[in-house]
Image: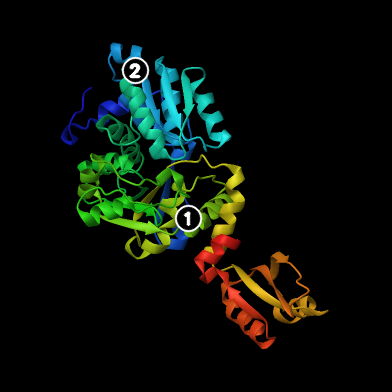
């Protein structure tokens, strides 16, 4: 394989290799976001890629450079997401056998999508409950069968392939001033960031991670990759416990800033992109847009590209996404309310406590005949977050005992 060190990353060859395989995805000007943030915002639509994410670029670039002997033996990967789909597509196109290890808890929709892209060229093995279990089994299988492992990010040919996103950005917008991109293991940032900096050192490169999986942030703070003991896997396309040994030093060099975004804010961005721009994105794909609120002061007047890294969002997750967004925006609140066990108590709550625009979205109550009052789990959705203090005040005036579950994470997770 051609590239063995960071200094030999060959983006131009990768770009030529990928022609006719990947789409040159659109770079779309977004008027709504531009008006809101006082800059010119362009969206790099990798959600419109053949497999609905940029991951195909790296997988194909690596596999296509294997020797005839390696191709005859086959390739292996561990992934429950976009890497698996890019890998499967590459195996079909290149005519090699692929084996994909996925956690046993992988949703059927993701398995079906991967099978579709592989079209008979791949075998899927479900094992373990976590990605780490899966990876261990995949590596053992690779060695036992003399096959080649295709990592999701920590390989120079994979990094070069992901870097072709940067090649396309500069082709379409040569005077771009800032590029914001999601970071999981660091392959996209290492590749695209390096290419962009090589051609214009003044381009502002900003990486974004979910708040619950800050592996690159910790690596930068600690001076090297560290394994996080626990992460929030909600933003699954960017939730890794440890960034790459190869990607980390490159990202350290090319990143001008590294930001974290709360998962709830990511959900708000997903909903706005869908409702206002008719763009379907997965959580990781929304990171670059979600961070604009937190970084707008440094983007005023600039030409800014936000990389929409993927659009593989399961429709079954939308209710969870809406709930997380409402909670983050302060529009949904859960309480334990102790209702007096007498007729009219609930009517008093509805008539005298709820505001004209408040809505009860959940109510669970078990009457206990031995006690004077009983607890109920109550969910209330507000029209504006500013209505919350008045709601609490009315509860106090009407002498309802309440526990605010949004402020008690342990109780919230147990009851809601």
Residue identified by numbered label 1:
266
Task: State the image coordinates of residue 346 (x, y, percent, origin top left).
Answer: 77, 76
Picture quadrant of residue 389: bottom right
For label 1, the crowd category at 10 Å Cα-Cα, with few meaning under 14, some 14 to 19 and many 20 or more, is many
- In the rendering, at what x and y percent does residue 168 appear? 35, 37
Q: Nearer the viewer, residue 199 or 358?
A: 358
Query: Residue 258, image x and y in percent?
Result: 30, 55
Viewer-nearest of discs 2 and 1:
2
Can residue 129 be seen in this snapshot?
Answer: yes
Spatial distance from mark 2 to mark 1, Cα to Cα? 41 Å
**Farthest residue, direction right:** 343
Secondary structure at badge 2 equals loop
On the rendered image, what quadrant is the N terminus found in? Answer: top left
Pick the quarter of the image with the C terminus.
bottom right
Q: Residue furthest front?
A: 370
Residue drawn at 48 percent across, 54 percent down: 31
Residue depicted at x 40% and y 46%: 238
Q: Nearer the viewer, residue 164 or 95?
A: 95
Dot 1: element: helix
Closer to the N terminus: mark 2 or mark 1?
2
Q: Residue 134 lies in what quarter of the image?
A: top left
Going by the image, does 77 lie left or right of 405?
left
Front in this rendered view, residue 342 or 32:
342
User: Which residue is identified by label 2?
Assistant: 145
Measured as percent of width and height from the top left, residue 360 is found at 70, 68
Q: Specify the color scheme.
A: rainbow
Residue 301: quadrant of the picture:
bottom left
């Amino acid at each position: 394989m051609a590239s063995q060190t960071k200094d030999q990353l060959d983006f131009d060859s990768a770009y030529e290799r990928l022609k006719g395989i990947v789409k040159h995805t659109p770079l779309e000007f977004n008027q709504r976001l531009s008006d809101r943030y006082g800059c010119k915002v362009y969206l790099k639509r990798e959600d419109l890629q053949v497999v609905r994410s940029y991951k195909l670029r790296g997988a194909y670039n690596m596999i296509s450079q294997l020797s005839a002997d390696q191709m005859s033996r086959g390739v292996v990967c561990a992934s429950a997401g976009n890497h698996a789909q890019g890998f499967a597509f590459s195996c079909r196109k290149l005519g090699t056998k692929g084996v994909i290890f996925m956690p046993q808890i992988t949703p059927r929709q993701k398995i079906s999508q991967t099978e579709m892209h592989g079209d008979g060229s791949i075998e899927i093995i479900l094992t373990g409950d976590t990605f780490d279990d899966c990876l261990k089994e995949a590596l053992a299988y690779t060695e036992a069968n003399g096959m080649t492992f295709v990592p999701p990010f920590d390989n120079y040919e994979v990094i070069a392939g992901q870097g072709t996103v940067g090649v396309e950005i500069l082709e379409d917008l040569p005077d771009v001033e800032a590029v914001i991109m999601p970071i999981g293991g660091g392959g996209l940032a290492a590749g695209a960031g390096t290419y962009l900096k090589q051609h214009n050192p003044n381009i502002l490169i900003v990486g974004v991670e979910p708040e619950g999986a800050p592996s690159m942030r910790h690596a930068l703070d600690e001076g090297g990759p560290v394994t996080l003991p626990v992460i929030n896997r909600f933003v699954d396309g960017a939730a890794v416990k440890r960034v790459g040994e190869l990607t980390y030093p490159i990202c350290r060099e090319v990143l001008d800033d590294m930001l974290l975004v709360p998962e709830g804010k990511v959900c708000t961005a997903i909903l706005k992109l869908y409702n206002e721009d008719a763009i379907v994105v997965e959580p990781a794909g929304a990171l670059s847009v979600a961070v604009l609120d937190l970084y707008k002061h440094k983007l005023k007047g600039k030409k800014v590209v936000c990389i929409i890294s993927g659009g593989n969002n399961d429709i079954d997750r939308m209710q969870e996404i809406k709930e997380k967004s409402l909670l983050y925006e302060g529009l949904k609140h859960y309480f334990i309310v102790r209702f007096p066990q007498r007729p009219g108590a609930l009517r008093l709550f509805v008539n005298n406590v709820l505001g004209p625009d408040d809505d009860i979205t959940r109510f669970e109550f078990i009457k206990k005949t031995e006690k004077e009052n009983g607890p109920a789990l109550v969910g209330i959705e507000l029209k504006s977050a500013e209505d919350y203090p008045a709601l609490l005040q009315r509860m106090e005036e009407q002498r309802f005992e309440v526990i605010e579950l949004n402020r008690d994470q342990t109780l919230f997770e147990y009851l809601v």
